[in-house]
Amino acid sequence: MSLLDYDFMQRALIAAFLTGLAAPAVGTYLVQRRLALMGDGVGHVALTGVAVGLLTGWAPVWTAVAVAVAGAIAIELVRAYGRASADVALAMLFYGGIAGGVLLTGLAGSTAATLNTYLFGSITTVSAADLWVVAVLAVVVIVLAVGLAPQLFAVCQDEEFARVTGLPVRVYGVLIAVMAAVTVAVAMRTVGLLLVSALMVVPVATAQQFTRGFRASFVLALVLGVVPSLAGVVFSYHVDVAPGASIVVIALAGFVISWPVGSMVRRHRNRHRPSDDPRVTGEHVTTGTHPHRHDATCGHPAVEHGDHTDYLHDGHLHAAHGQHYDEH
Amino acid sequence: MTESVVATRGLRVDFDERAVLHDVNLHVLEGEVVSLLGANGSGKSTLVRAIVGLVPAAAGEITLFGQPLATFRDWSRIGYVPQRATAAAGVPATVREVVASGRLSRRRLFRPATRADRAAVDHAIELVGLADRASDTVANLSGGQQQRVLIARAAAGEPDLLVLDEPNAGVDRGSQEAFARALRTFVASGRTVLLVLHEMGPLAPLIDRGVMLDGGRIVRDGALPATAGAGVPDHLDDHETGLFG
């Protein structure tokens, strides 16, 4: 009997696939923003959310989403408005999340084993109802991460510049935090709350070994998130370990292998670097055939350049030189 | 009539309840190239950051293109070049990707870049002489080349006003020349430039007016003599305003 004949395995693999896409999609923006540990913090806070679910009998995935979103917004606001003490405030939020989670779980009468399935994932526990929630949330996160890519890229690359282009930077900052929180809740059944951050960061770090640009890093990170997620779930089926551990170990193995390969690729690439544009280094570059004669009345905007005048012609500066024009 | 592009009246900016700009009245008209000069800590960077809305004003008013800053929404008219040591962030990005973010003020949400967007990005990259490096990682470029990427990013939005914060700081000679060339092209098309400079270098002939700040106040505002930079010093050293100043 193949593993795909089990309903629980089908659900676990679908959940792992969606998690493997959503986590690196958000993670790319977090790493670009140099907030790689944010997923970790949100994961800690989400544990309290799970415990609230266990205590009240509400679905833990929803209480986890609610508490994680609240925690993520708090982290983002402390980051945006806070001063030197921001890292201490964040640390306290993380500790509070874990301690609150363990405390409430105890009050609910649940065992440490129950808690473990949320901390490190558990392939047998993805219910059909859970899967729907996971699927909808993951698709929303992925659509936002792809559809708003130009805006999110600008905000994460240079927040001040983004503000001067008129982007509502605070709104996008909160959006990224909320997307991270939702991803944590999506991922808690497969990689678990304590290891979700690894699935956000490690595929991005591995992708960077090979890529030159953001879009390429993003796409490769999604692939490098899906492969270990599926492989880790299959591994946990054969060997009875928490899927979170096997997923993260496989992802890390990928990074370790990629490192030497990536540095070889980069060394090869850097060997032949093109030189600077000759026009900017002051070398003599003539324009192509140039039938037009520039003078004070020709209508092309003119600008003084040392001992002569440049004329702006079709986006280029032209300067008379003997019988021809130079590009300046 | 020439339009007022930037105007501040009675501007005061505080950091931690200490005033770093006092009663600053600055006017920049359409087509002017104005440089803010002064020693480190004189408030010239703070002034441009207040003008583009990154630093709140404690008192006074700022208008951009005749609109009060608080209600100004026409951000595509402004190209800002922040003071940065690097154009890179946590994930690699190509020159083209960074420059393309300069078009965002003209793009709509959830829409791909138009042909005009791509053409403007190509043109801006060519303007700073990096066409051969367009698909390289910005982190692999020299400091001066990265600075040119930031200038191309501002130019890609086809702004009417370019605001540059120390674009020449720590930049090699070749990149300074490249930058001067980009600025000449920009100025030739009749647009306005406000820049902070520590030293003028090859830019001196382009500058119409120098505004000197000292201790958060404007101490001198006027045309630079035709003999580039001979009358007005490139920058003020601290000792000039020291004990015997």
Image (cartoon, helix red, strand yellow):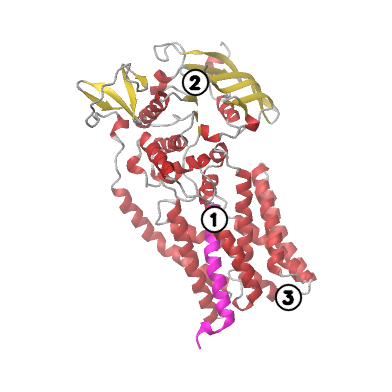
Label 2 – label 3 distance at C-alpha: 70 Å
* Residue at the outermost bottom position: A1
| Place of residue B177 in the rendered image (x, y in percent of width and height, measured from the top left) | 36, 28
Label 3 – label 1 distance at C-alpha: 37 Å
Q: Residue at horizontal 44%, vertical 29%?
A: B168
Query: Which image quadrant for residue A140?
Result: bottom right
Q: Residue at horizontal 40%, vertical 55%?
A: A211
Q: Amino acid at mark 1?
A: Ala
Q: Which residues are magenta?
A: A1-29
Q: Which residue is mark 1?
A: A145
Q: Is residue B182 left or right of residue A110?
A: left
> Judging from the image, what secondary structure is the residue with disc 2 in?
strand
Q: Which residue is mark 3?
A: A111
Please, is residue B102 above or below residue B217 in the view?
below
Q: Earlier in the sequence, mark 3 or mark 1?
A: 3
Of labels 3 and 1, the one closer to you: 1
| Place of residue B229 in the rendered image (x, y in percent of width and height, measured from the top left) | 42, 15
> Judging from the image, what secondary structure is the residue with disc 1 in?
helix
Q: Which residue is mark 2?
A: B34
Of labels 2 and 1, the one closer to you: 1
Q: Residue at horizontal 35%, vertical 39%?
A: B130
Mark yes or no: residue A90 visible.
no
Q: Amino acid at mark 2?
A: Val
Dots 2, 3 in contact, CB < 8 A: no
Question: In the depicted view, which residue is nearer to us: A84 or A81?
Answer: A81
Q: Is residue A114 left or right of residue B163?
A: right
Is A27 covered by the magenta stretch? Answer: yes
Of labels 2 and 3, the one closer to you: 2
Q: Amino acid at mark 3?
A: Thr
Q: Is residue B9 left or right of residue B144?
A: right
Question: In the depicted view, which residue is nearer to us: A316 or A272?
Answer: A316
